[in-house]
C-alpha cells in the first residue's frame, strides 16, 4: 500500500485531539506542517521526507571534532548546532595539553547529548560506557528523518542487516551510521542502506531489502566459493541462537578490547 | 524590440494567445540539486529559475544570531546571461530590494522559532528572465523550502497582474510588462493572505480591486501546480514498489517476528533498544534486584521495583523507541527516547490558532523529523 | 564556511584509492557520465548546460559591441567569469569571487584563448574602434567536484553554438561565432603517486595536488595549471599530459563533435 504524501498547509483532519508531530491546528482543523508521509494510524503525525537533525537531550549521535579549545572539544553534529564536550565530561581526567592527543580535529565520536538549552546550546557527554572515538569501520550518512526506517519495527530492519552482513551497526540519531565488518560485507551493507534511504516512502521496505540480499546471494552462488556458502549457514545459525538480537550493537562498542 | 501595435487580437486574446485570466505554462522539477537541502527548478513561460535551500544551519557572523528564532536569508540573483544585455554578476540595488521583499514573503509561513540562532538560506537563481522573475523565484523557493523539510504553515504562491491597453491581464508577458500601464506582483498564502505586494504604474481604485480578484485566481492555480509537483516527486518509486510487491512471495521471517510481543533479556552491561508499536507491551526481564525507571511522555516518572528474575512490563503509548539500559546491580533505565523532551525543546510543533507559544503536553511526543514509521 | 571531513571518511577514500578503487566504483582513468545540452538559454547568444556526474553548471555566452584594447586594436575581446554561487554548495558564500573561482575562470579562459579556438580577427568591426566582445559566464549550480573541467567543456560548447548578433546591432548579418578549435581541459590528481582523472568532491578533499591540462584536436597542449599543496614528479607531469590528451580526445568525440 502506498503511503499518503502530504505537503505543508494540507488539511488532514478535523480531529484536533489527535494532532501529533509535523502538524498544526488552525480554526479547529489539523494541517500538515511538513512535506512528508502521513501516519494517522493513531496520532496524526507527518514524517518529513527530509530535514536537518535537531539535537535533543539524551540522543546518541556521531559527531566530528571541529575545534579543540583548552577545555572543550567542539563537535559538528550534522545539525545547525554544534555540540560542546567539556573536558569534565570525558570519562577520565585529561590535562589541557593532552586533549588533542585524545581526540583531534576530524575524529568521529559516538557521543550522547547531555542537554540542550532554549538557545540550542548543546552540551555533550562521554561519561558513559560505550561512548568513544571510533577509528575503524566506516560512517555512512543518511537523512536523519530516515533513521526510524533504518532501524525498522522493533529493530527488524537493523536486525536483518546485521544478520545478512555480519557487520556491527550503530545508528546515530543524527543520521550518521557507523558500520564495521569485512570490506565486502560493508560494501553490501552500504548498498542496502542506500536502498532503504531512497525508498523510505514505500511500504514493504523490509521485504525489498530482504529481497536485495536474496538476489545478491543468488548471483553470488553462481560465482561463489563454498566458503561463502558456509557464511550463509552461519548466519542462519546466529538467527536462531540470538532471537533477541538487538537493534543497536552498542554492546560491541562497550568493550574497547574489541578493537 | 519595440512596442507592439496592439496587445489583443479580435477575439480578445493576448500576444501569446492567452486569455486575460490565463497564466503562462509552468513546469516544475523538485529536488534537482544534490548539494542543497531542498531545491526546485521552475520554468514559467520563458522564465527559468532555480531555487536552493540550505539549512537550518549555523549562522555566521554570530552577532546576527537571534536566540529565540532562526532568521531567513533570501538571495535573488540573476545570471549574467539571463537577460538581453549582459549584467554584471553579483548583487545590485534591484536584486537587493527583491531579495528583501521575497524574504518577507516567506517569514509569515516559515516556523522559524523552531530553530533558535540558526539561519535558513534561500537562493533563487534566475537563469533566464522573461517578465515575472521575482514571482517565479518565489514559487520555486516555496517548493524548495518544502523539499528541505522546513516546517511551514503552507506554501506561498506568487503571480503578477497588470494593465495593458486599459485592460487587466494576469501574469504579464515580456511586452505587456515593458509597455503596459501597471504591474502588480503579489504573493499569497493558501488562505489568501498577502505576503508580498508591490506595484508600479497606474490603477484606479476599482481597477485595483478587480486586479486583486484576478491575482487571487492566479495564485490559486499556481498553488495547485505546486502541490501537484510535490506530490509527483515520488511517483517513480511508487511504481517500483508495486513491482517489488508483486514478486515477493513470502515475507522475510524477521518481519513476522516483528509483529510479535517482544521479550528482552538484559545482561550485565548490556544496552538494548526496542522499538514498540501502538499500545504494545514491552517486557523487560531483569536479572537482579533492580529498579526499573520508566519515563513516560508526560514527563511523568513511574518507578517499578523488581525482584530476581521478575518480569517488568512497560507499556508504551505510541510508536516509540524504548531504550533499556541495564548495568550490573544498577538502575535499569527505560527511556522513551522519542518522547523525552523538555517543554522548551524545539520538538513541539503543534500550535493552536497560530499561537506559537502554546504547547499542550500531550503533543510533545516526538521531535520534528524523528517520528517512528509504521509499516 | 568550511566543511570538516571526518578522518574516518578521508581514510576510507584514501585507502580505497591506494587499492586502485574509487568511492563510486570508477577506474582511475574513468570520467563520470557527462551530459551536455546546448541552446538552453534563449537570451544568451550561446549557451550550454553541463553535468559532470552530479556537478552541474550553465555557461552563457553574450556578445556585445565594445572597443578593442589599445595593444591589440584589430581583434575581438574575450572576458571569462566564473561564479561559485552559494546555491551550488554549503561551503560557498555570497560575495565577489575568491581565488578559487578566479583561478578556474582564468584557466578556462586560457584554454579558449591560447588554443585560438575563436578567430578573434573576425570579431573586429573597425580597427582600433569597434570590436565584438565575447562574455563567457560560468554559473555554477551544484558542486560535486571538478567544476573546472565541466566549465571548460561548457565554455567551448556554448561558443560553438553562439551567434554574433550583428543584425540587432546594425552591423550586417548575424554570423556564427568563428570557432576553429575545440580545447578540452582534463584534470588529473595525484594519489599516493598514482594519477586519477576527474576527481569527485570527496576525492578533491583527499587529494592535495592536481594538474589540469587543456589540449587541442591535434593533441597539442594549449594551457596547463598545477594547483594544490603537493608536488608532482617530472615523470608524473609527463604521464598526466598523456592521460589528459587521450581523455580530452574522447570527450571531444563524444560530446563536442556532435554539436
Image: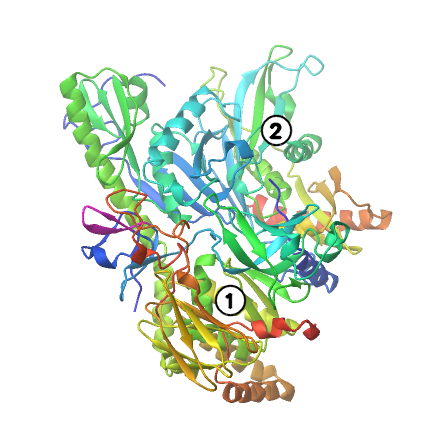
Q: Residue A253, relative to residue C235: is it above or below?
A: below
Q: Is residue C54 visible to us here?
A: no
- Farthest residue in the right direction? C234
Between circles 2 and 1, the one closer to the viewer is 1
Q: Nearer the viewer, residue A159 or B185?
A: A159
Query: Going 63% across and 15% down the picture, which residue do you hit?
Result: C68
Local packing at callout 1 (Cα closer than 10 Å; few below 14, some 14-19, many 20+) is many
Protein chain holding label 1: A
- Compared across the picture, whether A229 is left or right of C107 comes to left
Measured Cα–Cα span from mark 2 to mark 1 = 43 Å
Q: Quadrant of the N terminus of chain C?
A: top right
Q: What secondary structure prevails in the magenta region? A: strand
Find residue A43 and report its horizontal and vertical position in percent: 28, 62
Q: Residue B303, relative to residue C6: is it above or below?
A: below
| Quadrant hosting residue C100 | top right
Q: Is residue B20 magenta?
A: no
- Compared across the picture, whether B46 is left or right of B207 comes to right
Residue with the mark numbered 1: A193
Find residue C124 and report its horizontal and vertical position in percent: 61, 18
Residue with the mark numbered 2: C80
Protein chain holding label 2: C
Find residue B309 and report its horizontal and vertical position in percent: 47, 87
Q: Secondary structure at mark 1?
A: helix
Query: Going 49% across and 30% down the picture, which residue do you hit?
Result: B79
Q: Which residues are magenta?
A: A24-33
Local packing at callout 2 (Cα closer than 10 Å; few below 14, some 14-19, many 20+) is many
| Quadrant hosting residue B74 | top left
Q: Nearer the viewer, residue B40 or C178?
A: B40
Amino acid at each position: 500500500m502506498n503511503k499518503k504524501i502530504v505537503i505543508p498547509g494540507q488539511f488532514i483532519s478535523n480531529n484536533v485531539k489527535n494532532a501529533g508531530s509535523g502538524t498544526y491546528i488552525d480554526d479547529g482543523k489539523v494541517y500538515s506542517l511538513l512535506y512528508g508521509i502521513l501516519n494517522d494510524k493513531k496520532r496524526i503525525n507527518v514524517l518529513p521526507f527530509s530535514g536537518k537533525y535537531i539535537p535533543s537531550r539524551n540522543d546518541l549521535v556521531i559527531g566530528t571534532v571541529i575545534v579543540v579549545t583548552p577545555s572543550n572539544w567542539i563537535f559538528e553534529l550534522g545539525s545547525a548546532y554544534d555540540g560542546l564536550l567539556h573536558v569534565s565530561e570525558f570519562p577520565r581526567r585529561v590535562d589541557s595539553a593532552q586533549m588533542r592527543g585524545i581526540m583531534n580535529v576530524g575524529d568521529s565520536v559516538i557521543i550522547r547529548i547531555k542537554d540542550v538549552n532554549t538557545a540550542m546550546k548543546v552540551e555533550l557527554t562521554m561519561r558513559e560506557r560505550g561512548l568513544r572515538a571510533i577509528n575503524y569501520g566506516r560512517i555512512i550518512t543518511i537523512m536523519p528523518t530516515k533513521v526510524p526506517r533504518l532501524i525498522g519495527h522493533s529493530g527488524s530492519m537493523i536486525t536483518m542487516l546485521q544478520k545478512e552482513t555480519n557487520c556491527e551497526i550503530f545508528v546515530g540519531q543524527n543520521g550518521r551510521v557507523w558500520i564495521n565488518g569485512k570490506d565486502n560485507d560493508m560494501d553490501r551493507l552500504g548498498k542496502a542502506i542506500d536502498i532503504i534511504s531512497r525508498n523510505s516512502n514505500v511500504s514493504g521496505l523490509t521485504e525489498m531489502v530482504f529481497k536485495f540480499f536474496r538476489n545478491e546471494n543468488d548471483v553470488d552462488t553462481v560465482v561463489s566459493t563454498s566458503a561463502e556458502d558456509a557464511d550463509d549457514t552461519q548466519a542462519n545459525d546466529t538467527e536462531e541462537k540470538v532471537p533477541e538480537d538487538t537493534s543497536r550493537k552498542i554492546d560491541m562498542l562497550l568493550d574497547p578490547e574489541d578493537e | 524590440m519595440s512596442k507592439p501595435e496592439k496587445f489583443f487580437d479580435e477575439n480578445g486574446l493576448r500576444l501569446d494567445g492567452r486569455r486575460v485570466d490565463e497564466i503562462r505554462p509552468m513546469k516544475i522539477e523538485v529536488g534537482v540539486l544534490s548539494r542543497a537541502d531542498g531545491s526546485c527548478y521552475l520554468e514559467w513561460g520563458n522564465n527559468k529559475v532555480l531555487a536552493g535551500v540550505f539549512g537550518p544551519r549555523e549562522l555566521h557572523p554570530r552577532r546576527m544570531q537571534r536566540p529565540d528564532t532562526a532568521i531567513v536569508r533570501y538571495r535573488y540573483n540573476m545570471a549574467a546571461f539571463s537577460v538581453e544585455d549582459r549584467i554584471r554578476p553579483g548583487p545590485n540595488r534591484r536584486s537587493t530590494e527583491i531579495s528583501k521583499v521575497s524574504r518577507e514573503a516567506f517569514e509569515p509561513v516559515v516556523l522559524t522559532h523552531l530553530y533558535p540562532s540558526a539561519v535558513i538560506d534561500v537562493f533563487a537563481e534566475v537563469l533566464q528572465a522573461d517578465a515575472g522573475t521575482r514571482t517565479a523565484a518565489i514559487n520555486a523557493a516555496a517548493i524548495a523550502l518544502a523539499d528541505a523539510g522546513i516546517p511551514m504553515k503552507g506554501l506561498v504562491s506568487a503571480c503578477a497582474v497588470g494593465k495593458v491597453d486599459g485592460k487587466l491581464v494576469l501574469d504579464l508577458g515580456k511586452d505587456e510588462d515593458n509597455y503596459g500601464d501597471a504591474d502588480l506582483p503579489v504573493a499569497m498564502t493558501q488562505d489568501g493572505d498577502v505576503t508580498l505586494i508591490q506595484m508600479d504604474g497606474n490603477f484606479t481604485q476599482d481597477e485595483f480591486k478587480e486586479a486583486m480578484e484576478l491575482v487571487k485566481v492566479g495564485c490559486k492555480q499556481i498553488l495547485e501546480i505546486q502541490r501537484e509537483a510535490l506530490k509527483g516527486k515520488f511517483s517513480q518509486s511508487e511504481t517500483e514498489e508495486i513491482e517489488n510487491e508483486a514478486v515477493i512471495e513470502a515475507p522475510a521471517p524477521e518481519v513476522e517476528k516483528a509483529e510479535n510481543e517482544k521479550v528482552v533479556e538484559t545482561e550485565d552491561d548490556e544496552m538494548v533498544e526496542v522499538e514498540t508499536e501502538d499500545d504494545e507491551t514491552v517486557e523487560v526481564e531483569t536479572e537482579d534486584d533492580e529498579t526499573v525507571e520508566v519515563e513516560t511522555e508526560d514527563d511523568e516518572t513511574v518507578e517499578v521495583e523488581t525482584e530476581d528474575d521478575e518480569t517488568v512490563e512497560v507499556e508504551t503509548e505510541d510508536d516509540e523507541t524504548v531504550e533499556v539500559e541495564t548495568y550490573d546491580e544498577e538502575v535499569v533505565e527505560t527511556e522513551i527516547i522519542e518522547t523525552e523532551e523538555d517543554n522548551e525543546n524545539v520538538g513541539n510543533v503543534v500550535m493552536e490558532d497560530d499561537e506559537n507559544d502554546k504547547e499542550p503536553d500531550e503533543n510533545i511526543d516526538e521531535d520534528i523529523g524523528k517520528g517512528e514509521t509504521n509499516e | 564556511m568550511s566543511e570538516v571531513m571526518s578522518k574516518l571518511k578521508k581514510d576510507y577514500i584514501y585507502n580505497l584509492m591506494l587499492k586502485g578503487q574509487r568511492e563510486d566504483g570508477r577506474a582511475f582513468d574513468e570520467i563520470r557520465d557527462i551530459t551536455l545540452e546546448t541552446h538552453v538559454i534563449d537570451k544568451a547568444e550561446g549557451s550550454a548546460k553541463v553535468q559532470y556526474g552530479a556537478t552541474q553548471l550553465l555557461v552563457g555566452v553574450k556578445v556585445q559591441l565594445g572597443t578593442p584594447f589599445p595593444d591589440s586594436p584589430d581583434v575581438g575581446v574575450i572576458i571569462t567569469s566564473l561564479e561559485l554561487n552559494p546555491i551550488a554548495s554549503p561551503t560557498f558564500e555570497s560575495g565577489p569571487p575568491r581565488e578559487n573561482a578566479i583561478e578556474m575562470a582564468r584557466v578556462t579562459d586560457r584554454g579558449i584563448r591560447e588554443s585560438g579556438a575563436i578567430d578573434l580577427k573576425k570579431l573586429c568591426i573597425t580597427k582600433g574602434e569597434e570590436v565584438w566582445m565575447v562574455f563567457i559566464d560560468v554559473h555554477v549550480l551544484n558542486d560535486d567536484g571538478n567544476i573546472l573541467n565541466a566549465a571548460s567543456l561548457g565554455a567551448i560548447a556554448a561558443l560553438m553554438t553562439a551567434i554574433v548578433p550583428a543584425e540587432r546591432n546594425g552591423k550586417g548579418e548575424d554570423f556564427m561565432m568563428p570557432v576553429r578549435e575545440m580545447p578540452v581541459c582534463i584534470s588529473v590528481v595525484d594519489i599516493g603517486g598514482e594519477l586519477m582523472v576527474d576527481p569527485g568532491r570527496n576525492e578533491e578533499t583527499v587529494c592535495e595536488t592536481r594538474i589540469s591540462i587543456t589540449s587541442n584536436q591535434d593533441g597539442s597542449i594549449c594551457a596547463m595549471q598545477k594547483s594544490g599543496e603537493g608536488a608532482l614528479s617530472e615523470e608524473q607531469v609527463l604521464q598526466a599530459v598523456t592521460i589528459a590528451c587521450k581523455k580530452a580526445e574522447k570527450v571531444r568525440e563524444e560530446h563536442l563533435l556532435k554539436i
